[in-house]
Image (cartoon, rainbow, N blue to C red):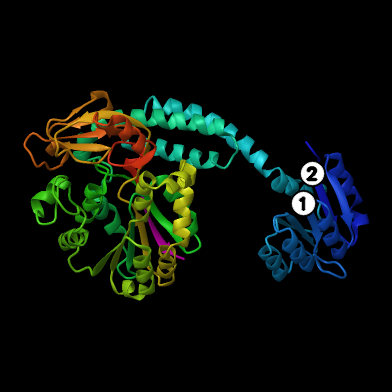
Amino acid sequence: MNAMHILWVDDEIDLLKPHILFLESKNYLVSKATNGADAIDLIDENNYDIVFLDENMPGLTGIETLSEIKNSKPNLPVIMITKSEEEYIMEEAIGSKIADYLIKPVNPHQILLSLKKNLDHSRLVNEKTTSKYQREFRKISMDLATVNSYEEWIDIYQRLLHWELELETISDPGMLGILESQKQEANSLFFKFIKKNYQDLLTSSDRPVFSHTLFKDFVLPQMNPKSGTLLVVIDNLRYDQWKVLEPHLQPFYKKTKEISYFSILPTATQYARNAIFSGLTPLEMEKRHPEYWKNDEDEGGKNLYEKEFLSAQLQRLQPEMTHEYHKITTSKAAQELDDNFNSLKTKELSVVVYNFVDMLSHSKTELDVIKELAGNEKSYRSLTLSWFKNSPIFSTLQKASRAGMQLVITTDHGTINSKNPTKIIGNKNISSNLRYKTGKSLSYQEKDVYAVQKPKDIFLPTQHINSSFVFAKEDLFFAYPNNYNHFVKYYKNTYQHGGISLEEMIIPCAIFEPK
């Protein structure tokens, strides 16, 4: 490995000989310059790994030299060293994207620490992260052997997500492979837990927050009627996606509370999102609002009456609350909402549903370019973040913060990359979703599904007396025997939802106050 090459720029460079000798003893190569003009020439002629730059020099100042360096080599890290503690100098340097800022007198170990932080950062982080995950791997594996409650499953899923996001920053595909295997094991055990306990969880006094109880049990008690509340529902937002979006809200909001709640089955928009807005199970929706509810076999859109469901729920819970509802399915509509933001401030509750992430996940099935851009989980998260930062939604949230509005962000369900087929047979009216099926005379692989012969037991309606529901486990998707190979090839490695997995069922809801 070649020695790291440092350029040290200081008009009193001779006084720094002990520091330079110390660095050379640590196998760093140090070149010297006594003024900004010479430093710029040297940087143009040589490839340095990092620059130490004195702020107070005759001729070109450190700040002026820094500006020239960044113009010619913007990615070259520069550490500013100064006697001055003037705030404006510090702000100027930081604004020019310096790598570090040191106040004289500096000792050799400060210099070494700064070098380690900037030059060896990736290696040190890689080694530390790998070591920490190896220890955590063993602990998670032990916990998976004994997990027996929904609270423990939330905890394990959060820990797996943490390490997935940590490991994606290091260059060790082996560690990511180990994590992926551990996630698969977790999903296998989670499926068994849900299959055994789902019916009881729905009715237990110690139940998790579900889709149909989210608004009543969590959102409404936290609302601030004086400031107004903006409730944002991002369709099909997985927890890992939320984790990469959240930091970008920090300049504008402080988080006051967050929960992990459970999407009901099926983990599909027609069921889960209608349940959020109605505050009812699908079976209750069908009974109370037959004019709004549609089953899988019914023609027409299945989520056309969310506004009406929301109004009916508020009429039961808080009839005096003023509210409005917006569903955003295009960038044009998102921009129009942002342009007309002031209208949102007039209501105590403003609800906005954004469908982009759901459209992105489905596009992976249909568009080759999305298959390439979202080829793995990291790139899928990156695409989601790119949309969020560049969408009018981000501008709307900033305006809401400036207006003093409370913010609630949630989703209706997650999604999973479906990698393996499982065969299913049914009549011609069988539902089309690839992660759950409902209909008559279903034939399937028993080990691959959670089968519910009496849907009313889990508060699901049916159109026929002998209709059942089946939910696919882990990363499976349903495939028909007819034209099987073509079907599997088309849908393999596509994002699907409706079934049972950590990714689909355990989802976030967070509440923020403006800064």
Q: Estimate the x, y position of residue 367 in percent, counting from the top left.
A: 39, 48
Mark sitting earlier along the chain (2/1):
2
Q: Secondary structure at mark 1?
A: strand
Quadrant that contains the N terminus: top right
Give the spatial CA distance, label 2 vs label 1.
8 Å
Residue at figure coordinates x 70%, y 48% from the top left: 118
What's the mark number on residue 366? Answer: none
Q: Is residue 152 visible?
A: no
Residue at figure coordinates x 37%, y 62% from the top left: 407
From the viewer's side, name the closer residue of 254 and 467.
467
Question: Dot 1: few (<14), some (14–19), or many (≥20) neighbours within 10 Å?
Answer: many
Say if 57 sits above or below 143 in the image: below
Q: Which residue extends farthest left?
A: 465
Say if 288 sits above or below 429 in the image: below
Say if 508 sits above or below 445 in the image: below
First to last magenta residue range = 508-515
Q: Residue 437 vs residue 118: left or right?
A: left
Residue that mark 1 sits on: 50
Using the rendered view, name the quadrant where residue 143 is placed. top left
Q: Residue 186 vs residue 425: left or right?
A: right
Question: Dot 2: few (<14), some (14–19), or many (≥20) neighbours within 10 Å?
Answer: some
Marks 2 & 1, CB-CB < 8 Å contact: yes
* Type of amino acid under label 1: Ile
From the viewer's side, name the closer residue of 513 and 310.
310
* Type of amino acid under label 2: Met
Residue 511 among those drawn in magenta? yes
What's the mark number on residue 4? Answer: 2
Q: Estimate the x, y position of residue 204 in percent, counting from the top left.
A: 21, 38
Q: Is residue 28 visible?
A: yes
From the viewer's side, name the closer residue of 34 and 258.
34
Residue at figure coordinates x 90%, y 57% from the top left: 13
